[in-house]
Amino acid sequence: MATATRFAAVPRAGLFTPEHDELRDVIRQFVQRGLKPHAEEWESSGEFPVRDVFAQAGTVGVFGAKYQPEYGGTGPDLVADAVITEELALCGSGGVAAALGAHKDLGPYYVYRFGTEEQRRRYLVPAIAGERIGALAITEPTAGSDVGAIRTRAERSPGDGWRLTGTKTFITNGPIADFVVVAAKTDPAAGRSGISLFVVEAGTPGFSANRVDTVGWRTSHTGELVFEECEVEAGAILGDENRGFYHIMASFQWERIVMALSAVTAAQATLELAMAYARDRQAFGRPVSKFQVWRHRFADMATQIEAARSLSYHALRKVVAGEDAVREVSMAKWLATELDWRVADEALQVHGGYGYMMEYPVQRAWRDARLGPIGGGTTEVMKEIIGRSFGL
Ligand SMILES: Cc1cc2nc3c(=O)[nH]c(=O)nc-3n(C[C@H](O)[C@H](O)[C@H](O)COP(=O)(O)OP(=O)(O)OC[C@H]3O[C@@H](n4cnc5c(N)ncnc54)[C@H](O)[C@@H]3O)c2cc1C
């Protein structure tokens, strides 16, 4: 008995407590009952009932783990948020996981980190409840990896507010968002030290959004956002004027950790898909030699998934402890997302021609996984950061 108590007091992987396990059960039930059974239908139509799903997710606490109860949150607990991320990755649709995940970790999180109390009440509280959707718009048609090169301009307007002009692209939830955190140049001559963040509400004159077509994440609404002399009030600025670049860099750490965790979980699910297919085939009496080749493939993938999971948890532990984890987070992000893509490709290969058919879910895992090494900072950018961290 004493032994059991002692073990229970030690969080698993140095991270998860029994409370986290309970939370995992709650989120798993929501994902497995409320999302997964609809994934096929939603993916076929490229749509999902956005408002209903966000509201349901808000009710079960998907968006609140990082925040105090005074905002409607259940935290702050970053490990709980990581648990939610892992469970969302099992919903069967990369697009739905991306839509909910981007809302959880991007726009509203920026409002919490850099916003005034008034901004938190106005945007964060309804975002946690799943009643208002938030997005984050940094990338532009000519500035992705190089955030400092953005061209969207914010100038002082005669009415004491700001006037935004420019175009953002590839913005997750952009076309369905109620508010968007937008990066714009307030002092173009100052380069990266001349960027500020603004909260722009949908429906503001001069702001429009269009959905773009994507290879994967088919249910997620990815969009191009246009700002044409779009006037916002003085209070729309988020965080310190001209500190936007540094706010973005600081926030990238969480975005990259959750991308790593999500990728590891998705890779595991894809591997299980392939194993199930292989077992079926074996049962049908297909040649044993083929199964031996598969067995080694599975061993290879399973080993690498465990390695990526360990690295991701190591990075998470450092972040949770408040330590500098830029190197480890960058390592985890590139390793896990590249692995998810490789596992998906191998899993499709195991399926042979069936893998290329839309009827089999492995094709979706393959299309969805391709985004990981691109979004949230590409693999090449991660390697730049890691290399520089060694003074190279
Ligand atoms: C589905 C989807 C959703 C997205 N959601 C959002 C969102 O919600 N908000 C948002 O702001 N953005 C979002 N993005 C944008 C994403 O963050 C960018 O696509 C990404 O940062 C890469 O930028 P880019 O597309 O401009 O490519 P580029 O920066 O032009 O890169 C092109 C290639 O050059 C390489 N490269 C660039 N710089 C270097 C370098 N210094 N050294 C070596 N190689 C380099 C890159 O690795 C890449 O392979 C999304 C993208 C997609 C596809």
Image (cartoon, helix red, strand yellow):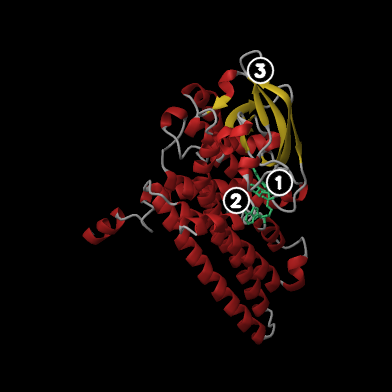
- Count neighbours of disc 3 (C-alpha within 10 A) and say few if under 14, some if 14 to 19, many if 20 or more: some
Mark 3 / mark 2, whichever is N-terminal? 3
Check disc 1 and give the amino acid type: Thr
Q: Nearer the viewer, residue 228 or 335?
A: 228
In the rendered view, would you say 246 is above or below 38?
above
Residue at x 62% of width, y 78% of height: 294
Mark 1 / mark 3, whichever is N-terminal? 3
- Count neighbours of disc 1 (C-alpha within 10 A) and say few if under 14, some if 14 to 19, many if 20 or more: many
Mark 1 / mark 2, whichever is N-terminal? 1
Q: Nearer the viewer, residue 331 or 304?
A: 331
Residue at x 51% of width, y 29% of height: 239
> In the image, which is nearer the foreground, mark 1 or mark 2?
2
Check disc 3 and give the amino acid type: Ser
Cα–Cα gap, marks 1 and 3: 38 Å
Check disc 2 and give the amino acid type: Gly
Q: Quadrant of residue 242?
A: top right
Cα–Cα gap, marks 3 and 2: 33 Å
Task: State which quarter of the image contains the N terminus.
Answer: bottom left
The image position of residue 391, as x and y in percent, is 46, 57
In the rendered view, would you say 284 is above or below 143?
below
Instruction: Determine which residue is flagged by label 1.
Output: 219
The image position of residue 299, as x and y in percent, is 54, 75
Asked whether the viewer can see residue 84, the reply is yes
Instruction: Determine which residue is flagged by label 2.
Output: 377
Instruction: Determine which residue is flagged by label 3.
Output: 157
The image position of residue 171, as x and y in percent, is 68, 41
| Residue farthest front in this picture | 189
Q: Quadrant of residue 192?
A: top right
Cα–Cα gap, marks 1 and 2: 22 Å
The image position of residue 323, as x and y in percent, is 38, 49
Is there a contact, CB below 8 Å, between mark 1 and mark 3? Answer: no
